[in-house]
Amino acid sequence: MNNLPDGLFAFLEHAGWAGAVIDPIPGDASFRRYFRVADGGRRAMLMHAPPPHEDPQPFLDVARWLAQHGHRAPAIHAAEPAEGWVLTEDFGNDRMRDWLDANPAGEEQAYAQAIDALVQLHQSPPGPFAPYDMSVYHREADLLTEWYCPAREIAADAAAYRTAWGKALAPLLDRQQPGVTVLRDYHAENIMLLSPAADGSGEQGLIDFQDALVGHPAYDLVSLLQDARRDVAPELERRMLDRYRASTGADDQFEADYALLGAQRNAKIVGIFTRLARRDGKPRYLSLIPRVWQALERDLAHPALGPVADWFSANIPDEVRAAHGGGVR
């Protein structure tokens, strides 16, 4: 077959899958590549995450931790991380986002189960992962001033931006102790419906969790309910946030932290999508910025975002904000 990575057949042979049929899967925003492999009645997913751009070891570590604590990550069949190869359980084709496009009546139940999975995750002890500390929050939020503002020819005050985020996020750092495992990209494209029923119920599986850190429980909730790639109605967001709070006993301060992390995450995503277009030649992500910007505006309206909201008012022109972020040229 053409364009298959070197070493693929040797890895499959070592893994006990020699002669398997290989079916490439379209890629995502990373250097990783995925293939479905079939050998008689056996099915598996093959990931190639080659160094130096990728390192599959964090994926393996997080997958094993999740499985050990009763969370539904794909089983690992074989791995050669130094060469970038991982063979895992195949979760099938039903991404939550795609399934809901075809089965909108199942939305409430599918999201409810995704919330319940987060509740379960947050009841586990935090994993042995690095902390989601202020340096990470700053590095992520800075992507807006590093990529988006120059693309829009906005002469933003980057130093004041950092100061504003420091003031807003400092109190949150104490509240996120001792922390929970934060998957960091928990949304409808990274949740697999393994056996979906017509009402949206059924087992759900997790993918794309290799960047897990230990941080605040609101982060993955924001990732799910302020989805950059799928419209989530504010009414559904409210019901699911209430569901989480009812299950965990989270107080009103949690609402402020949810808005803080929503704004931080959405600012990061605007920067990432701009970088994907400008640096990596992937302009399709630009069409998602208006949705992200709308969520960012809602978060900025919360009083907890005062310093950051003031910076946006002073640095991002009204006409850009009125266009919900506009288009990057």
Image: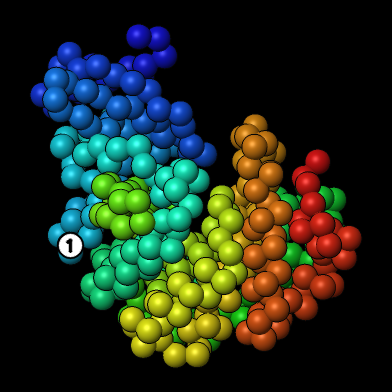
**51 sits left or right of 204 in the view:** right
Look at the image and tell me whether residue 152 can be seen.
yes
Residue 327 in the image: state x and y as whole percent. 78, 47
Q: Residues within 10 Å of mark 1 (few under 14, many from 20)?
A: few
Q: Quadrant of residue 128?
A: bottom left
Between 213 and 293, the residue placed more toward the observer is 293
Between 210 and 42, the residue placed more toward the observer is 42
Is residue 304 found left or right of 73 in the rendered image?
right
Q: How many marks?
A: 1
Percent from the top left, x then y, of residue 270? 66, 54
- Kind of residue indicated by mark 1: Gly
Residue in view at x 48 percent, y 52 percent: 104
Residue 211, percent from left and from top: 39, 54
Query: Residue 211: in sight, yes or no?
Result: no
Q: Secondary structure at mark 1?
A: loop
- 265 w.r.t. 75: above or below: below
Return the residue found at the far top: 1
The residue wearing badge 1 is 70
Q: Residue at x 45, y 28 (%)?
A: 26
Whether residue 192 is situated above or below residue 173 in the rendered picture: above
Is the image coloured rainbow, by chain, by secondary structure, or in one colour? rainbow
Q: In the figure, 44 relative to 151: above or below?
A: above
Question: 215 above or below 230?
Answer: below
Q: Residue at x 56, y 52 (%)?
A: 230
In the orientation shown, which residue stands out farthest toward the left? 16
**Residue 316 in the image, given as x and y percentages of width and height:** 82, 64
